[in-house]
Image: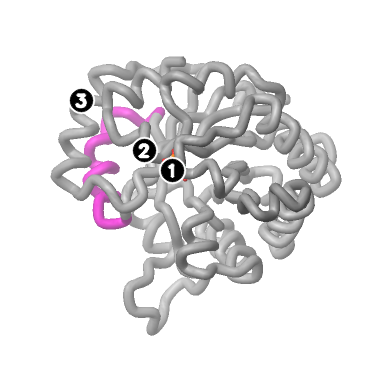
């Protein structure tokens, strides 16, 4: 396992919150609460319009990685309203969320589109964080593993093994997102072990260094127990990442 894989990953997905002014204020506060730590990897996914403000605020903090929440799979073209991976890279993003549950289930993104976005990210030199997770009806039908494995295989189907070895994976059960219902550490761990196994099938020993994050109603009260579960290498947090003090408390967990 590499030193990198030993670092816990804390990723803030702001969704459609915090425009440029709020981003500036947030980062001013957050940076006073979070000094660089070599055992932590911290990533922010602001709205696209706030990315350059975030990048600017992090000029003296190269330890914190800016990201974007979504990209189009084409590099450029007549796609009104979309942003491409090369543009995100040019604006300072290093990481990109691909296949987030809201992209899949609110905007109807398919496995095939997710795969093309993974390829676009890799082409542009962005690190993709591939999000997977089952809906409540799939969980109740005992399909959690099958769904997660399907999404993982689809998302990695068009990138080379060396690129797969460089991704991050986030397991976010759809029923736990924004609902206050969290998977138990045991449930999260069980699915993370399935993901690790599948990654091992894809890239062998290198799978051990791929961070697998848990997401879904993570907060200050449950972060520690989730991080203590086997194969949970970090957290992807929505609501609880919107307050700089609260988020810094989670990052320092
Ligand atoms: P919440 O933490 O608000 O449940 O959101 C989780 C999520 O979707 C992060 O990507």
Does the magenta segment cover residue 60?
yes
Q: Is residue 17 left or right of 175 when viewed as pictured?
A: left
* Mark sitting on residue 239: 2
* Mark sitting on residue 38: none
**Image quadrant assignment for residue 247:** top left
Disc 1: residue Cβ within 8 A of ligand 1's nearest atom: yes
One can see residue 206 in this view: no
In the image, residue 108 above or below residue 168: below
Does the magenta segment cover residue 213?
no
Question: What kind of colouring is applied to the model shown?
Answer: one colour
Dot 2 surroundings within 10 Å: few (below 14), some, or many (20 or more)?
Answer: some
The percent position of residue 19, horizontal first and vertical second, equals 21, 49
Alpha-carbon span between mark 2 and mark 1: 7 Å
* Mark sitting on residue 29: 3
In the image, residue 95 above or below residue 87: above
Disc 2: residue Cβ within 8 A of ligand 1's nearest atom: yes
Identify the residue at horizontal 62%, vertical 28% (top origin).
Answer: 184
Main secondary structure type of the part rendered in magenta: helix
| Earlier-in-chain disc, 2 versus 1 | 1
Give the magenta-colored segment's residue range. Answer: 48-63
The percent position of residue 110, horizontal first and vertical second, equals 60, 69
Question: In this figure, which residue is indicated by the disc labeled 1?
Answer: 178
């Amino acid at each position: 396992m590499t030193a990198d894989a030993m670092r816990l990953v804390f990723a803030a997905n702001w969704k459609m919150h915090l425009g440029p002014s709020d981003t500036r204020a947030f980062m001013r506060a957050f940076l006073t609460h979070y000094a660089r730590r070599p055992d932590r990897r911290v990533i922010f996914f602001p709205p696209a319009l706030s990315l350059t403000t975030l990048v600017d605020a992090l000029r003296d903090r190269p330890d914190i990685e800016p990201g974007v929440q979504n990209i189009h799979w084409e590099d450029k073209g007549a796609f009104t309203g979309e942003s491409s991976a090369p543009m995100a890279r040019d604006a300072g993003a290093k990481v990109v969320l691909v296949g987030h549950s809201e992209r899949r289930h609110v905007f109807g993104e398919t496995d095939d589109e997710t795969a093309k976005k993974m390829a676009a990210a890799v082409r542009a030199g962005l690190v993709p964080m591939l999000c997977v997770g089952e809906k409540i009806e799939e969980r109740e039908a005992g399909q959690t593993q099958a769904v997660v494995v399907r999404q993982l295989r689809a998302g990695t189907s068009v990138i080379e093994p060396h690129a797969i070895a460089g991704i991050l994976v986030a397991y976010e059960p759809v029923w736990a997102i924004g609902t206050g219902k969290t998977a138990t550490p045991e449930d999260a761990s069980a699915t993370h072990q399935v993901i690790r196994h599948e990654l091992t099938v894809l890239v062998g020993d290198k799978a051990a260094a791929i961070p697998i994050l848990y997401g879904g109603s993570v907060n200050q009260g449950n972060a520690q127990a989730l991080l203590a579960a086997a194969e949970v290498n970090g957290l992807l947090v929505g609501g609880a990442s919107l307050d700089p003090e609260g988020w810094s408390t989670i990052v320092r967990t």
